[in-house]
Image (cartoon, rainbow, N blue to C red):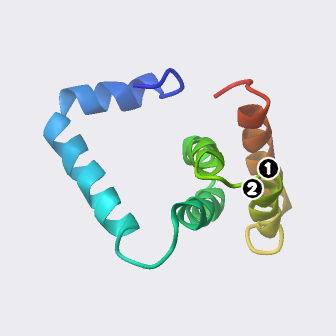
Amino acid sequence: MPDHLPDVYVGFRSRFPEIAQSQDALAQAVDAAGPLDEKTIRLVKLGIALGAQADGAVRSNVRKALAAGATVAEVEQVILLGITTRGFPATVAAWQWMAEVIEGGQE
């Protein structure tokens, strides 16, 4: 598994491999259930993660969006869209998490 995964996540997957595999299969099925491409899926999930103020999910979806071909500008726009829906503090927090991933800092 990648180095940036939290120990609690790795530990949960190790302790409950069948549940983790089922979750992975569900995620794949949901991603394949509609017409959105991988980049768009990752950008949408980034917006959802921002709304939930889920630090790890923001970081994960920034990495996955970039890997799927999103530009830094596209990722930043998704973060900025949170200002009028989720609020300034939540958006600034998500922007910080995004910047740390992009800069290779804390992941």
Instruction: Tell me the kind of residue under disc 1.
Output: Val
Residue that appears at 79% across and 49% down: 72
Residue that appears at 53% across and 65% down: 41
Q: Quadrant of the C terminus?
A: top right
Vertical placement of residue 70 versus 83, above or below: above
Which image quadrant is residue 39 in? bottom right
Residue that appears at 27% across and 51% down: 23
Looking at the rendered structure, the number of numbered marks drawn on it comes to 2
Question: Residue 53, image x and y in percent?
Answer: 63, 53
Residue that appears at 85% across and 61% down: 88
What SS does tag 1 mark?
helix
Question: Residue 25, image x and y in percent?
Answer: 24, 54
Vertical placement of residue 81 versus 8, above or below: below
C-alpha distance separating marks 2 and 1: 5 Å
Q: Which mark is residue 104?
A: none
- Packing grade of label 1 (10 A; few <14, some 14-19, many >=20) is some
Residue reaching furthest to the left:
18
Which image quadrant is residue 14 in? top left
Q: Residue 32 versus residue 53: which sits nearer the camera?
A: 32
Find disc 2 in the rendering and name its residue.
75
What SS does tag 2 mark?
helix
Instruction: Tell me the kind of residue under disc 2.
Output: Val
Q: Residue 36 versus residue 105: which sits nearer the camera?
A: 36
- Packing grade of label 2 (10 A; few <14, some 14-19, many >=20) is many
Q: Are marks 2 and 1 in contact (CB under 8 Å)?
A: yes
Residue 20 falls left or right of residue 65: left
Residue 90 falls left or right of residue 37: right
Question: Residue 76, image x and y in percent?
Answer: 81, 55
Residue reaching furthest to the bottom:
35
Vertical placement of residue 80 versus 72, above or below: below
Q: Which mark is residue 72?
A: 1
